[in-house]
Amino acid sequence: MNIRLTQVALASALVAGAAQVAVHAAAQTPSSVRVCTMPGSPSAELDKSVARAVLSTAGIAATFASRGIDDNGDDDGISARELSKSLQRDCDVIAGFPRSSVADGSDSQLLFSQGYLHSGYVSIALPGDHAANTNVAAPDGKITIAATWSSPSQLIAVEQKNARFDLETTSRLTVDAVAKGRAQRAIVWYPAVVAYRRAHPQQHFDVAVAESPYADWNLVFASGPGTQQLQKRIDGALARLRSDGRLAALTRNWALPATIATGSATTRASLVRNPARYLDGPTQPSPRADVWRVSGMPAAGGFIKVAATTEAPSFDHEQVAHGEHLYADSCAKCHGEKLEGNTAPSLIGPAFAPAANSHLTIGGIYQYMSTNMPADHPGKMSDEEYADLMAFLLYTNGYDTGNVKLTAQAAQSSTTPLNAGPRH
């Protein structure tokens, strides 16, 4: 999940995967705390403002970590390991941690406050774009919908009918796809729309509810084990700010418009009566490869930075067989038994490996996978096991076996775009 963009996708993986976080937290409420925000979050400005108000009201001094959550300057997202490292080294509490009904954190060692911003994923289009709002554009009746790769945005997008998809690497670029005409519509987290409008005040969008169980999210404060008293003080401060109107004043410009929020509640009532049952049920089939269009890698930044090879690396049949066993043991519970996607995105078909013009590289995916996955125990496999797992993913997406084993070094250094190969 490429999360300079949307920390929301990461939160789903971390919370559902029960991140093992060890922090040095005092049993009593501290007199001062270090606050981190999520890297690249569109709501970071709001998160800091709310944190200042809440902690001041609670009588706790706050300092803000300049790094953010393990903000190391790359675009490869953040893992449970990185979260744990940041909580030990830089932070006592995280402001702007997203939670949802499909990732409730019941198995997590993190502690959470009450929510301070109820928001979610929305569908946006340019004002008056009749085609975007009626799913009629091209002669074949399909429109192009922008989504953010490997995030709830993508999960919601694949539920749309009569659509092609423009996969972007950040939520800002997802909004920009509509503004610049690369897509007629986009599925995006609403605070990203707010942040985009602040940077481009002349830009306006029609905004509608995204009807999906993956759409509904709340921003909270998160901290590690042993911080019950701190979270109690934070909840008390939130209650005071809510009762005297200060919280509403802080979040007013970031909250979903009243008409959208009302629609979202109706949608939740019909779609999320039992999120776990929904996720256990059959998944939607992936769209055919010819209805996807994936935009190019941004010039500055992208999924991951790796150094150069031009051809897909070789792998052998033995690696594919072993990789399939590894996948079944460690990946299928989130990504689906047939890689079709479950609580995490699909790892097969055009959502993962489009037919052409992918902005995701084999090396980028390998490096992300080997440092961030599985979500409940990132980095638990050996280099050889991650290479075998990568071989399985390549094979299931159309690449043929060869006579040379795939090494971790070859996988990591490959800059070959991950485009679906011819079927075996």
Image (cartoon, rainbow, N blue to C red):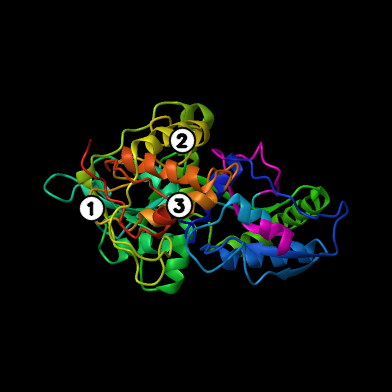
Residue in the image at 51% along x and 31% along y: 329
What residue is disc 3 on?
A: 408
**Is residue 91 something one can see in this rendering?**
no
In the rendered structure, are the residues bearing label 2 and label 3 in contact, judged by CB atoms less than 8 Å apart? no
At label 1, counting other C-alpha atoms closer than 10 Å, the crowd grade (few under 14, some 14-19, many 20 or more) is some
Residue 403's place in the image compared with 37, above or below, is above
Image: magenta residue range: 85-114
Nearer the observer, 75 or 414: 414
Q: Earlier in the sequence, mark 2 or mark 3?
A: 2
Residue 421 image offset from top left, x and y in percent: 24, 45
Residue in the image at 19% along x and 45% along y: 290
What residue is disc 2 on?
A: 327
Name the element at disc 3. helix
Checking the image for residue 356, the label placed there is: 1
In the rendered structure, are the residues bearing label 3 and label 1 in contact, judged by CB atoms less than 8 Å apart? no
Residue 155 image offset from top left, x and y in percent: 40, 43
Residue 130's place in the image compared with 400, above or below, is below
Residue 104, by quadrant, is: top right
